[in-house]
Image (cartoon, grey):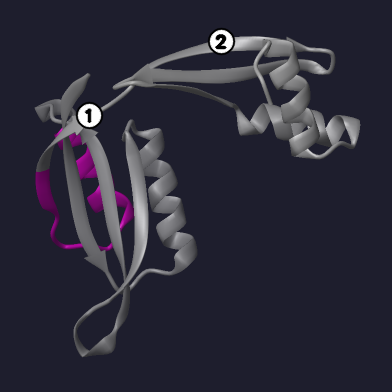
Amino acid sequence: MNDRVCEFECNIDDMTAEEIAFAAERVMEAGAKDVSVTPIVMKKGRPAWLFTVMCADDEAQKSAMIEQIFRYTSTIGIREIISARYILERSEAVVATPYGDVRCKYVSGYGVSRHKFEYDDLARIAREKEMSIAEVRRVAEAAAGKPE
């Protein structure tokens, strides 16, 4: 399966780590497919951030992301990169364990098939039952009928 995505990038050298994290959170909440922040060094050796936002290659979505980036960061310019993207088919299910439900994401395609349990569910059960996340994952694997 494939689609087209847009990546917006900007270099930021005048925001704190907390401000950048808040901006990334807000842009994700606004519908970005992904947001990444990479430490970089700009001219004259200035430390900075490369703020990257991935969204659908759709004019309405792109416009919304541009607005969010300008609103929550101090950038004065944004670069646009259009890319082809290959993705796996995705599905979700809930696995009932003796300790509670755990959401599981399944992906397949291009000759691969794998799954991953939702971290938040594993962590919740681990806290409640005073277990490690690895222990909870083993219980979820057994409940799902999958090998560990």
**Which of label 1 and label 2 is nearer to you?**
1
Taking the spot 29% from the left edge, 57% from the top edge, the residue there is 51
Label 1: few (<14), some (14–19) or many (≥20) C-alpha neighbours in 10 Å:
few
List x then y, in percent, for residue 69.
26, 49
Look at label 1 and name its amino acid: Tyr
Q: Which mark is residue 116?
A: none
Residue 147: quadrant of the picture: top right
Q: Is residue 128 above or below residue 95?
A: below
- Tell whether position 29 is magenta: no
List x then y, in percent, for residue 64.
21, 35
Give the spatial CA distance, label 1 vs label 2: 23 Å
User: What range of the chain is rendered magenta?
Assistant: 62-81
Residue 148: quadrant of the picture: top right
Q: Judge by depth and name the residue closer to the eye, 139 or 42.
A: 139
Q: Is residue 31 above or below residue 67?
A: above
Taking the spot 63% from the left edge, 33% from the top edge, the residue there is 119
Taking the spot 75% from the left edge, 27% from the top edge, the residue there is 138
Taking the spot 16% from the left edge, 62% from the top edge, the residue there is 76
Quadrant of image for the N terminus: top left
> Disc 1 vs disc 2: Cβ atoms closer than 8 Å?
no
Q: Which residue is mark 1?
A: 86
Q: Which mark is residue 93?
A: 2
Look at label 2 and name its amino acid: Ala
- Tell whether position 71 is magenta: yes
Work out whether mark 1 precedes mark 2 in sequence or the reverse, and give the earlier one. 1
Horizontal side of 34 relative to 5 (left or right) equals: right
